[in-house]
Image: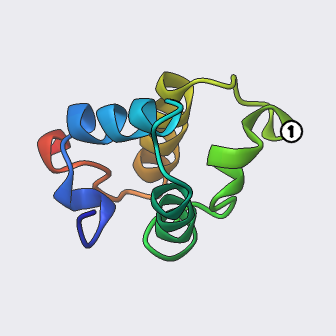
Amino acid sequence: MKNKLQDYTESEFLQLLLASEELDFSDDDLDYLVIFFNEKINHPKGSALLTHPTMLGIEDSSEAIIEELKRWYKEQGKLCFKDSM
């Protein structure tokens, strides 16, 4: 994984989220992704975006998580993905 969300293009991060839904995505990789959400993504809901999106009022899909990240980062006046400059 990269050091921060802004090191990913939107497409790259979407592919990572989609891969996390596959059966062959290891528990270690999933744990690391949860840690990445908690430590590297500044969204106040952290890994709950990944693990419990519907409890946050977000559709349970990788695309909806991406849209929520983009919405929140834009609201904060921050760059979300490296290709959103």
In this figure, what is the number of numbered marks?
1
**Residue denoted by label 1:** 55
Point 35% across, 33% down: residue:
14
Query: Closer to the camera, 64 or 26?
Result: 26
Point 43% across, 52% down: residue:
73
Query: Closer to the camera, 62 or 70?
Result: 62
Question: Along the horizontal axis of the image, is 4 left or right of 41?
Answer: left
Q: Quadrant of residue 78?
A: bottom left
Residue furthest bottom in the image: 39
Question: Along the horizontal axis of the image, is 73 left or right of 78?
Answer: right
Mark 1 surroundings: few (<14), some (14-19) or many (≥20) residues within 10 A: few
Residue 45 in percent (x, y) is at 69, 59
Residue 71 in percent (x, y) is at 49, 38
Residue 49 in percent (x, y) is at 65, 47
82 in relation to 12, above or below: below
Question: Along the horizontal axis of the image, is 26 left or right of 81?
Answer: right
Point 41% across, 46% down: residue:
74
Residue 52 in percent (x, y) is at 77, 43
Quarter of the rendering occupied by the N terminus: bottom left
Q: How is the image coloured?
A: rainbow
Point 48% across, 40% down: residue:
20
Question: Along the horizontal axis of the image, is 55 left or right of 68?
Answer: right
Q: Quadrant of residue 57?
A: top right
Three-letter residue code for mark 1: Met
Q: Secondary structure at mark 1?
A: helix
Query: Closer to the camera, 54 or 33?
Result: 33
Residue furthest right in the image: 55
